[in-house]
Image (cartoon, helix red, strand yellow):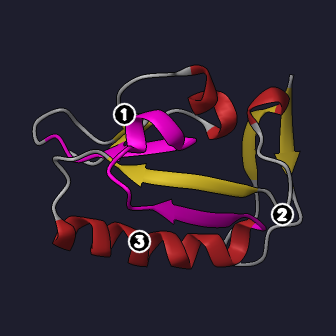
Amino acid sequence: MCKTCVEMPKPFSRAVAPDLSLWRPGQIITIGFLDEVSYPARKEIIGFAAEWESVVYLHFDYQFDGRASEHTMVRIDCMPGKGSWSYVGSDCMMVHEGATMNFG
């Protein structure tokens, strides 16, 4: 079963995701970067995420302690040639090692 969110502000009008994959409104999501992600890439990703964060009713808490693979809900990597992909919503919490999002 999927849920359609219709209360999103413009320019977004709808989003679809399985119910169990949705983050709770207002939830704090910890985000870390794998060691290979450069500082300029991290800065750019955080900038884009800030725009997204303003419309999704979630809060992002970035962890910079170098232990992203152990202590964060979302783990970002930048592996060229591996495509850009992400687990959907809270599905990333079922993955205990490695990246849960890649910008390639």
Which callout, 2 or 3, points at the residue further toward the start of the chain?
2
At a point 52% along the width and 40% down the height, the residue shown is 71
Label 1 – label 3 distance at C-alpha: 16 Å
Q: Can you give x and y, in whole percent of width and height, for residue 68 in the image?
A: 40, 44
Front in this rendered view, residue 1 or 76: 76
Quickly name the residue at label 1. Answer: 99
Amino acid carrying label 1: it is Ala
Q: Can you give x and y, in whole percent of width and height, for residue 62 in the image?
A: 49, 63
Amino acid carrying label 2: it is Gly
Front in this rendered view, residue 97 or 46: 97
**Quarter occupied by the C terminus:** top left
Membership of 78 in magenta stretch = yes
Counting other residues with Cα less than 10 Å from the Cα at mark 3, is it few (<14), some (14-19), or many (20 or more)? Answer: some
Q: Secondary structure at mark 3?
A: helix
Q: Secondary structure at mark 2?
A: loop
Counting other residues with Cα less than 10 Å from the Cα at mark 1, is it few (<14), some (14-19), or many (20 or more)? Answer: many
Quickly name the residue at label 3. Answer: 46
Q: Which residues are magenta?
A: 57-79
